[in-house]
Image (cartoon, helix red, strand yellow):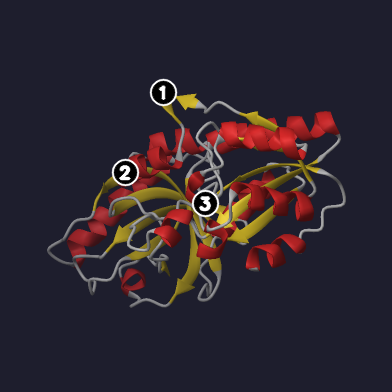
Amino acid sequence: MLVEEELARALPENDTALTIGVFDGVHLGHEFLIKKLKERASDGGLLSVVVTFHRHPRLVLSPRSNLTYLTSIKERIRLLESLGVGCVVTLSFTRELAELSAREFIGLLQKYLRMRSLVVGPDFALGKRREGDAPKLESLGEELHFSVEVVEPMVCEGGVVSSTAIRSALSQGEMIKVSQLLGRRFTLSGQVMKGDQRGKTLGFPTANLVPDPEQALPPDGVYTTRAFVNETAYTAVTNIGVRPTFGDGKRVVEVHILDFEERELYGHEIRIELAHRLRGEVRFSGADELKEQMRRDVEQTRALLVP
């Protein structure tokens, strides 16, 4: 089985305390859960392990689902590792894995990851038809000799912090709320692709990113952003959309980096953090009107994003 092959690669050198989930967004609620995991691991002399799924179970079990990701798997692993856990294990979520009973899956975690403690949220469940809810896991823990800790969800602004809540705020362009729930700014990454050079001819050269179709995006419009080129941060203005004035209808992410010594970026990967939504996307009468609006966008970005 693929799941056994992937688990066997981890080879932890110690017994472990672990948590399991998709962890899309690695938001404040996830951080709170992982803090509890690290405490449990420290108390028991265990290695803290996070098991994350790729792909999202909903996309595998309901292929027509229009679910989008807040973070790519690469970014998710980077964020999880930055929280100081001992090990991050990525499992491919497949229909074969979904057919495992809770007991079978727990057995694999004990066999390959040396699991002694399991830390989960209140709505967590694993195994076929989500049979392994908290009471079932606690029962299995007594039988198979591992502890189970259920961590209450984090609440912010009167609501539970969740990936669903963040997607909802993101879809409305509520970037301040998104940042509050994530505990950081929403991030997009991608390779710079060659565009039509129109931004350069207008005096506002852009690095063009083609977003992954499964990447969650805010509404089309113009945003104040931070752009990271080789981990150096720059203030930037970013347009997300179809460029109604001169575009060909394809959705792109155009990043105009301020005070940037122009150089070849094609093929390089850059990361952007979205801070504020300035305005929606607008069709202009021509190049002059577009240039004037871009100048105002830059001025407003400089005012909002003070270094």
Residue type at mark 2?
Gly
Looking at the picture, tell me which residue is in the foreground, 285 or 63.
Answer: 63
Residue 136: x %, y % from top left: 59, 36
At label 2, counting other C-alpha atoms closer than 10 Å, the crowd grade (few under 14, some 14-19, many 20 or more) is many
Q: Is residue 7 left or right of residue 167?
A: right
Circle 3 is placed at which residue position?
A: 128
Q: What is the CA distance from the residue labelled 1 to the residue labelled 2? A: 17 Å
Name the residue: 53% across, 58% down: 99
Looking at the picture, tell me which residue is in the foreground, 206 or 281.
Answer: 281
Precedes in sequence: disc 1 or disc 3? 3
Residue 44: x %, y % from top left: 83, 32
Name the residue: 19% across, 65% down: 244
At label 1, counting other C-alpha atoms closer than 10 Å, the crowd grade (few under 14, some 14-19, many 20 or more) is few
Circle 1 is placed at which residue position?
A: 157
Name the image quarter holding the N terminus.
Answer: bottom right
Residue type at mark 1?
Glu
Residue lying furthest top: 158
- Helix, strand, or loop for circle 3? helix
Quadrant of res 97? bottom right
Query: Vertical placement of 121 versus 250: above or below?
Result: above
Q: Is residue 49 left or right of residue 177?
A: right
Query: Vertical placement of 75 versus 21: above or below?
Result: below
Circle 2 is placed at which residue position?
A: 173
Residue type at mark 3?
Lys
CB under 8 Å between callouts 1 and 2? no
Q: What is the CA distance from the residue labelled 1 to the residue labelled 3? A: 35 Å
Name the residue: 60% across, 28% down: 151
- Helix, strand, or loop for circle 1? loop
Q: What is the CA distance from the residue labelled 3 to the residue labelled 2? A: 36 Å
Which-is-in-front pick, marks 1 and 3? 3
